[in-house]
Amino acid sequence: MSKKTILLVEDNPDDEMLTRMALQENNLLNEIVVAHDGVEALDYLFGRGRHAGRDLNDKPQVVLLDLKLPKLDGLDVLRAIRADDRTKFLPVVILTSSNEEQDLLAGYSFGANSYVRKPVDFQQFTDAVKQLGLYWLLLNEPPPGR
């Protein structure tokens, strides 16, 4: 099995830093690939643009996906992931500050595996990321052959 990489799709540098710190604080030292917009996330997943030639068999263990992104929003990224046979089973966790019920419903209807609201408090945020990391990186059993 390939290394357990996390694809973090996050345009806010502060939230990126907090997520990295929370993972490190909890000794989840997996490689973190950051995409700062939706197009960059899909380029990474499908080996396009600056990620051309990347080994596409080396899929991330989990995608942590923000919704409010430049160029292509998180729901469009999720739709594209689910529409492609190479990534349709990839675990996608929406990690967002959105409190909109329509975002929650849309996220699940487009195939999100989980929807987590970013807590404002750092300790709660750290705890939430720890739980996400432990579950998706250590406990979750991915589909065979992915």
Image (cartoon, rainbow, N blue to C red):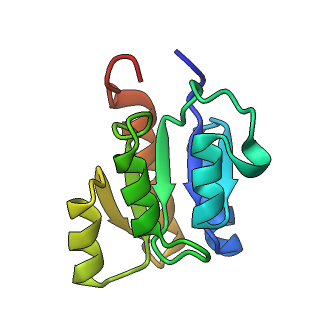
Residue at image location 46% in from the left, 60% down from the top: 77
Does 50 appear above or below 69? Answer: above
Q: Is residue 4 left or right of residue 108?
A: right
Residue at 35 percent of width and 48 percent of height: 82
Please state if 40 lies on the left or on the right of 108 as rendered: right
Residue 71 coordinates in the image, percent (x, y):
61, 75
Q: Is residue 18 left or right of residue 89?
A: right
Q: Please tell me which residue lies in front, 69 or 100.
A: 69
Task: Classify 64 as above or below 100.
Answer: above
- Observer able to see residue 20: no
Which residue corresponds to the image point at 38% horizontal and 80% vertical from the top-left?
A: 98
The quadrant of the rendering that contains the C terminus is: top left
**Where 133 sits versus 17, above or below?**
above
Question: Residue 38: which quarter of the image?
Answer: bottom right
Residue 1 seen anywhere in this rendered image of the structure: yes
Q: Residue at x 24, y 81 (%)?
A: 102
What is the count of numbered marks?
Answer: 0
Q: Position of residue 16 (x, y in %)?
A: 65, 64
Question: x, y (%) of residue 58?
Answer: 59, 27
Instruction: Return the residue nearer the eye: 131 or 35.
Output: 35
Q: Position of residue 143 (x, y in %)?
A: 31, 24
